[in-house]
Image: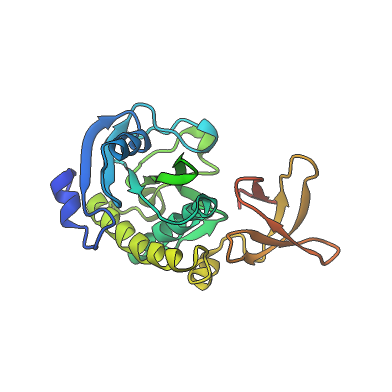
Amino acid sequence: MITTIYNEETISKEINTKWAGKTVHFAKETDSTNEWCKRMSKENAEHGTLAVAEFQSAGKGRLGRKWTAPEGSSVMMSILLKPEFEAQYASMLTLVMGLSVAQAVCELGVEVSIKWPNDVVVSHKKICGILTEMGVQDGKIREVVIGVGLNVNLKEIQDELKDKATSLYLETGKTYDRNRLIGLVMEKFEINYEKFVQTCDLSMMLDDYNMLLANKSQPVRVLDKISPYEGVALEIDKDGALLVRVQSGEIRKVCSGEVSVRGLYSYI
């Protein structure tokens, strides 16, 4: 029986980590969990503080897209980080979280992959969006906030997204305990983050990530604003760039945040 209770207490019970999500704040409704974490950062909330909401009135995804979901259907959460490394490395944390979410979903027995850089996909459709934001003060990182929106028990996808998005429920017919899923994501993220800070790159996670890479060996179109091109995606490198072999045989590095990659024949 899946518990329908979802609050600070039920989430905390499922988190067995040293610091990631050790402190949980829950709200039935907030503007956005990312904004909430930024406010808590100003109040000196500790590294690893987790904000979870059932509903966001101003949730957003990449490129400012609005993110909303019906009650009981999704995980909407953000983790507050206080890294000591240089600001230039922070963008890679989006890939670290993407890998962590994918690994957590794998633990539930669902076949999952990652569309580079950080879209977690099931059956070639997106189930998770991740938004990373950084605050800088005097040239140093003040905080990094990573927001996760995960379609768990969503029973319907709006028409315009049906070819691109899905949920765990729609793909498996099963209902999942969101408390447990949050616990799994925090467990995986803590392990991966601790690997990341040792090298400030993805070298210790490369095999894990590339094994789940949905774009691997797939024909892709790189949507470069100046000169888009096509090729075959190979894998990511330690800096999180996607390596693409073009027709001439040259291997190009595609950096996340600069351009988008689309499958030639589908979303992936």
In percent of width and height, residue 56 lies at: 33, 31
Coloured how?
rainbow
In depth, the one of 223 and 85 nearer the eye is 85
**Is 266 situated left or right of 143 in this image?**
right
**Is 171 situated left or right of 260 in this image?**
left
In percent of width and height, residue 34 lies at: 37, 38
Tell me where residue 231 sits by quadrant. bottom right
User: Residue at left 27%, top 41%?
Assistant: 44
133 up-or-down from 197: above or below: above
Extreme residue in the front direction: 138
In percent of width and height, residue 238 lies at: 58, 66
User: Residue at left 46%, top 30%?
Assistant: 66
Asked if residue 194 can be seen in this view, the reply is yes
In depth, the one of 63 and 166 nearer the eye is 63
**Is 205 situated left or right of 104 in this image?**
right
5 up-or-down from 190: above or below: above
42 up-or-down from 24: above or below: above
In depth, the one of 10 and 200 nearer the eye is 200
User: Residue at left 40%, top 60%?
Assistant: 100
136 up-or-down from 2: above or below: above
Extreme residue in the right direction: 248
Count of numbered badges drawn on the protein: 0
- Quarter holding the N terminus is bottom left
In depth, the one of 24 and 228 nearer the eye is 24
In percent of width and height, residue 182 lies at: 28, 53
Asked if residue 108 can be seen in this view, the reply is no
**Is 153 situated left or right of 206 in this image?**
left
